[in-house]
Image (cartoon, rainbow, N blue to C red):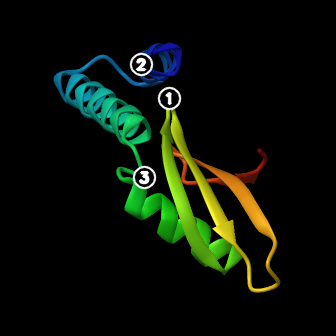
Amino acid sequence: MKLALTLAFLILTLSPMSAHSHGNFASAITVVKANQQAKQQLRVKSSKKAAQIAKARLGGKVLKVNKRSSGYRVKLIKKDGHIVSVYVDAKTGKVSRGN
């Protein structure tokens, strides 16, 4: 929200005050709101997608997927027999190792 207000302030102070500039202001605010909504949307919406992402990153076979508050815990067995547990963030799709 602060970004939107800062952007709005800059647009108002740097643009001449005309009917046309008010249209630019409204479209700039629309773009900012659309970007914020896109960032809030989840990239990983299912345990199946989380498993696909983890498998693509690490290889092996998916043993189990558990939903967590903001992502998924994926347990895989690698070709060498090691069991690996990773976390897939639902918002970003980022894979991080951990127990």
- Nearest to viewer (mark 3 / mark 1): 1
Q: Give the residue pinned by disc 1.
A: 69
34 or 28: nearer the viewer: 34
- The 10 Å Cα crowd at callout 3, few under 14, some 14 to 19, many 20 or more, is many
Compared with 54, 99 (above or below) is above
Asked whether the residues under the numbered discs 1 and 2 touch, taking CB atoms below 8 Å apart as contact, a structural biologist would say: no
Q: Residue 37 at what x, y percent from top left?
A: 34, 34
Distance between the Cα atoms at labels 3 and 1?
13 Å
Task: Give amino acid for label 2.
Answer: Ala
Q: Is residue 10 left or right of residue 40?
A: right
Task: Give amino acid for label 1.
Answer: Ser
71 or 62: nearer the viewer: 62
Q: Residue 36 at what x, y percent from top left?
A: 40, 32
Q: Is residue 55 left or right of residue 52?
A: right
Mark earlier in primary sequence (1, 2)? 2
Element at badge 1?
Answer: loop
Q: Give the residue pinned by disc 3.
A: 44
Q: Residue 46 at what x, y percent from top left?
A: 36, 53
Q: Quadrant of the C terminus?
A: top right
Distance between the Cα atoms at labels 2 and 3?
32 Å
Mark earlier in primary sequence (2, 3)? 2
- The 10 Å Cα crowd at callout 1, few under 14, some 14 to 19, many 20 or more, is few
Q: Number of callouts in the render?
A: 3
- Nearest to viewer (mark 2 / mark 3): 3
Say which residue appears at 60% left-offset and 66% top-offset. Answer: 54
- The 10 Å Cα crowd at callout 2, few under 14, some 14 to 19, many 20 or more, is some
